C-alpha cells in the first residue's frame, strides 16, 4: 500500500533534519575538540584554579569529555598544591573527578562549573605556628601587574563526594582525621540541601540541613547562612547561624544545641554516666571563641554562664563565669581496684598515684564559679559554694574558696604545682568554724560522738603523687577543736578506740554510761610527715582533764601517745580513781593501749619530752599549771608547752574562745 505523497514528503524532511543535526553536531564536536583538546582544557582549568587559589593544579591521569547538552569532563589523578609553608607538597589529591561545564561561557574563555563529583579524596588541612591556615587562598596577578580576570563562576547545581579522608594538623604530632563515606549538595532555590555520612573517632555520623550556595561563600559578597543537624548513636547536635561577609578571617555566629544520652558511654568512663545537654550562642572571630549565654545540663542539673577562649599571640586562654543552683556528683565512676598492701601490714593511706598531672590545665585558665548546693560522695552537702580557679601549664590555684558545711562555714585555698623533675608541690589552707558533728558524720566523724560543734584550722605543704607520699612529706599545722559533745555508751561501742581509751583512763567506768565532753582538742605541728606533740592533744569533762604527748609518724604510719589524766578538784572524781599514764602505741591502722607508767615515761624521754617521775602531783602540776583548775584544752590550743601563768579569773573563763580567734587571725 502506497503512503500518501504528503506524509512521505514530511518523513523525508524529518529524516533530512535529523541527518543535518547529526552532521552539525559532528561538526561542532570536531570543531570543539580541535579548539579545546584535553591538554588545552586541562591548562585552562589549571589557570583558573591558580588564579582563584594561588595554588598549582595538575591532572596527572587521563582527561575525557562529552559535548552535549553540557560539557562533561572526567579527569583522573588530580592534585592541588599546598601553601608554601605546608608540611607536604599537595593539599588535595583526588583519584577521579567528573564535572559539567556550561558550553556558552566556555567559548568566551570562562569556566562555569555546574555539577561536580569526586571519588577517593585525600585532603590535608593545617595551620602554621603563626596561625595561618592552608585553606586561605590567595589570588595571583597576571603579568604586568593587572588582575588576571574575575574568579571562575562556580554555580553548582549539584556536588557529590564518594570516599574522602580529611586530616587536620595544628602542629607537630597533633593530627585528627575524618572519613566521609558520602556527601551530596543539591541546589534548591536560594539554598543548598546538604546530606553526608562520615566517620569520626570510631563513630558514624549523619549530617543533614541546608546552607547558602557555595558560590556565595566563595564570592564573600554577603553573609552566608547555614542550618545543620548532626547525629550519631546517642548524640545529636544542631547549629544555626551565619558566616559574616568580611575580609580576612570571617566572623562566625551560631546558636548551638547538643544532647548526649549517656556522657560516659559516649566520651569515655572518665566522665559521669549521665545525660548531657548544651545550648549556647557562639561567636568566633580572629581565633577568639565566645559562648554567651551558655547553658549546660547534666542529668537534669543546670550550669549557666559564659565562656571565652582567647587567642593571645598564638596562645590560648580560657576565661569563664559559671553558676548552678544544684550539682549532684555523688555517683562517680567506680575507681580502679587498689593494689593489695604488702603482706603483714595494714595501711591507712593509699600508695596509688593520684592523677594530678591530668587535672592541671595545659593553657592559662581563670574560672569564677558559684553553686548554691553541691552534693559530693562521702561528704555532707555543701551550700553557697563560691570560688575561683586560676591555672597555667603545670600549676593551678583554687581560691579563695568558701562554702557552708554541716551548719558551719569553711574557707580555704589550694595551690598545686608540678614540674617534670619534681613531684607535685601542694599548699593547703583551711579554716572551718561551727561545724555540727552530727551533720558531718559522712566526713568521718566517729559514730559514738554525739552532738557538739567543731572548728578546724590547717596550713599544710606536701609533696608527692600518692596520699601516703603527701603525708610523709607534710609540714605545717592542724588544729581541731570540738566543744559540747558526748561519748555515747553501750556495749556495741566498747571496741571503739576512743571509748577503749576512756575505759583505760577511768578504770571501772560503766561502758554504757554517756560521757559529756566539754572540749576536745588536737593540735598537730607537722614537719616532714611527723607530728611531735607536747600536750597538744587534750580532753576535758566536768570532772576530768586529759592531755597527751608523743609522736605521730605518717610516713611509717605509726603513733606513740601517752595520756595524762587529772581529776579536777572539788568534783566527782578523785586522783586515785584514775590511771597514771596510759600509752597508745602501734600502727595507725590498729594501735594498742597499754598501762605502763615507767615505759610511757621512757618513750617520752626518747622523743625528747621530759616527764616528771616523782609522783602524779608533779605531772599534774606540769600539765595543768598550778592549782589544776582545768587548762588542758587552752594549753593544747595555744601550742605552748610551758607552765600556765594565767590568773584564776582567766582560768575560769571560756576555754574555747581561742580557736575562733585563731582562725580569724590566720
Image (spheres, rainbow, N blue to C red):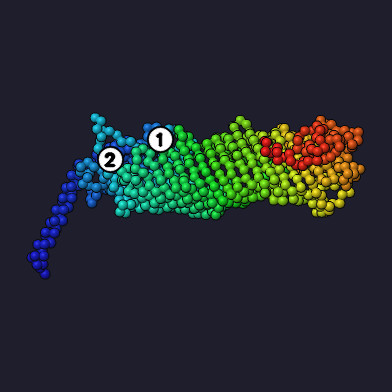
Foreground residue among 385 and 185: 385
Residue under label 2, please give it: 151
Residue in view at x 65 percent, y 43 percent: 410
Q: In the image, what residue occupies the spot 46% across and 34% down?
A: 312
Image location (x, y in percent) of residue 196? 40, 51
Question: 246 or 467, which is in the foreground?
Answer: 246
Question: Relative to residue 447, is residue 137 drawn left or right?
Answer: left
Q: Is 423 positioned to the left or the right of 587 in the image?
A: left
> How dense is the environment of label 1, judged by Cα within 10 Å: few (below 14), some, or many (20 and up)?
few
In three-dimensional space, the C-alpha distance between marks 1 and 2, rounded to whole angstroms, equals: 23 Å
- Helix, strand or loop at label 1? It is loop
**Label 2: few (<14), some or many (≥20) within 10 Å?**
some
**Which mark sits nearer the N-terminus, 1 or 2?**
1
Residue in front for this viewpoint, 59 or 367: 367
Q: Is residue 561 visible?
A: no
**Which residue does the image show at 65% across and 37% down from the upper left?**
428
Q: Which of the labelled discs sits on residue 132, or is there none?
A: 1
Amino acid at each position: 500500500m502506497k503512503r500518501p505523497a504528503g506524509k512521505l514528503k514530511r518523513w523525508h524532511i524529518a529524516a533530512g533534519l535529523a541527518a543535518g543535526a547529526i552532521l552539525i553536531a559532528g561538526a561542532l564536536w570536531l570543531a570543539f575538540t580541535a579548539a579545546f583538546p584535553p591538554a588545552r582544557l586541562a591548562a585552562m582549568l589549571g589557570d583558573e584554579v591558580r588564579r582563584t587559589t594561588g595554588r598549582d593544579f595538575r591532572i596527572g591521569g587521563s582527561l575525557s569529555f562529552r559535548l552535549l547538552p553540557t560539557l562533561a569532563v572526567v579527569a583522573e589523578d588530580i592534585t592541588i598544591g599546598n601553601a608554601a609553608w605546608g608540611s607536604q607538597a599537595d593539599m588535595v589529591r583526588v583519584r577521579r573527578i567528573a564535572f559539567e561545564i556550561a558550553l556558552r561561557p566556555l567559548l568566551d574563555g570562562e569556566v562555569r562549573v555546574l555539577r561536580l563529583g569526586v571519588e577517593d579524596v585525600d585532603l590535608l588541612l593545617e595551620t602554621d605556628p603563626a596561625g595561618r591556615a592552608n585553606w586561605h587562598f590567595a589570588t595571583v596577578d597576571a603579568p604586568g601587574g593587572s588582575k588576571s580576570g574575575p574568579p571562575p563562576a562556580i554555580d553548582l547545581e549539584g556536588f557529590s563526594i564518594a570516599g574522602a579522608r580529611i586530616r587536620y594538623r595544628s602542629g607537630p604530632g597533633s593530627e585528627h582525621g575524618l572519613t566521609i563515606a558520602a556527601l551530596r549538595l543539591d541546589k534548591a532555590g536560594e539554598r543548598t540541601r546538604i546530606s553526608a555520612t562520615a566517620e569520626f573517632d570510631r563513630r558514624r555520623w549523619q549530617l543533614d540541613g541546608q546552607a547558602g550556595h557555595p558560590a556565595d561563600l566563595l564570592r564573600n559578597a554577603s553573609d552566608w547562612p547555614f542550618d545543620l543537624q548532626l547525629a550519631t548513636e546517642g548524640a545529636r547536635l544542631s547549629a544555626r547561624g551565619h558566616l559574616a561577609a568580611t575580609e580576612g578571617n570571617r566572623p562566625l555566629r551560631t546558636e548551638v544545641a547538643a544532647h548526649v544520652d549517656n556522657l560516659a558511654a559516649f566520651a569515655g568512663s572518665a566522665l559521669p554516666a549521665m545525660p548531657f545537654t548544651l545550648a549556647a550562642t557562639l561567636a568566633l572571630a580572629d581565633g577568639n571563641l565566645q559562648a554567651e549565654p551558655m547553658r549546660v545540663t547534666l542529668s537534669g542539673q543546670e550550669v549557666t554562664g559564659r565562656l571565652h577562649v582567647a587567642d593571645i599571640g598564638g596562645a590560648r586562654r580560657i576565661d569563664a563565669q559559671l553558676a548552678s543552683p544544684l550539682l549532684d556528683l555523688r555517683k562517680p565512676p567506680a575507681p580502679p581496684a587498689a593494689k593489695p598492701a604488702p603482706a603483714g601490714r595494714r595501711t591507712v593511706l593509699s600508695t596509688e598515684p593520684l592523677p594530678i598531672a591530668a587535672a592541671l590545665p595545659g593553657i592559662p585558665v581563670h574560672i569564677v564559679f558559684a553553686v548554691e548546693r553541691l552534693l559530693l560522695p562521702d561528704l555532707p552537702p555543701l551550700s553557697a559554694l563560691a570560688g575561683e580557679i586560676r591555672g597555667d601549664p603545670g600549676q593551678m590555684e583554687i581560691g579563695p574558696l568558701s562554702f557552708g558545711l554541716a551548719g558551719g562555714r569553711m574557707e580555704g585555698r589550694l595551690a598545686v604545682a608540678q614540674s617534670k623533675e619534681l613531684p607535685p608541690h601542694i599548699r593547703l589552707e583551711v579554716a572551718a568554724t561551727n561545724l555540727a558533728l552530727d551533720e558531718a558524720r559522712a566526713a568521718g566523724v566517729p559514730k559514738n560522738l554525739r552532738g557538739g560543734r567543731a572548728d578546724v584550722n590547717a596550713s599544710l605543704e606536701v609533696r608527692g603523687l600518692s596520699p601516703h607520699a603527701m603525708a610523709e612529706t607534710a609540714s605545717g599545722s592542724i588544729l581541731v577543736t570540738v566543744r559540747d559533745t558526748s561519748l555515747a555508751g553501750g556495749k556495741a561501742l566498747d571496741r571503739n578506740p576512743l571509748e577503749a581509751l576512756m575505759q583505760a583512763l577511768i578504770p571501772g567506768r560503766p561502758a554504757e554510761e554517756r560521757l559529756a565532753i566539754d572540749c576536745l582538742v588536737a593540735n598537730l605541728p607537722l614537719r616532714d610527715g611527723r607530728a611531735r606533740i607536747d600536750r597538744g592533744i587534750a580532753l576535758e569533762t566536768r570532772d576530768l582533764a586529759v592531755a597527751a604527748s608523743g609522736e605521730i609518724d605518717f610516713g611509717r604510719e605509726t603513733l606513740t601517745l601517752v595520756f595524762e589524766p587529772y581529776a579536777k578538784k572539788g568534783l566527782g572524781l578523785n586522783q586515785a580513781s584514775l590511771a597514771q599514764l596510759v600509752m597508745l602505741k602501734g600502727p595507725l591502722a590498729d594501735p594498742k593501749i597499754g598501762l605502763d607508767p615507767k615505759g610511757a615515761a621512757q618513750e617520752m624521754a626518747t622523743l625528747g619530752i621530759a616527764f616528771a617521775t616523782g609522783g602524779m602531783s608533779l605531772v599534774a602540776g606540769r600539765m595543768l599549771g598550778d592549782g589544776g583548775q582545768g587548762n588542758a584544752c587552752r594549753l593544747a590550743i595555744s601550742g605552748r608547752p610551758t607552765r600556765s601563768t594565767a590568773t584564776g579569773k582567766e582560768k575560769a573563763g571560756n576555754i574555747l574562745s581561742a580557736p575562733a580567734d585563731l582562725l580569724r587571725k590566720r
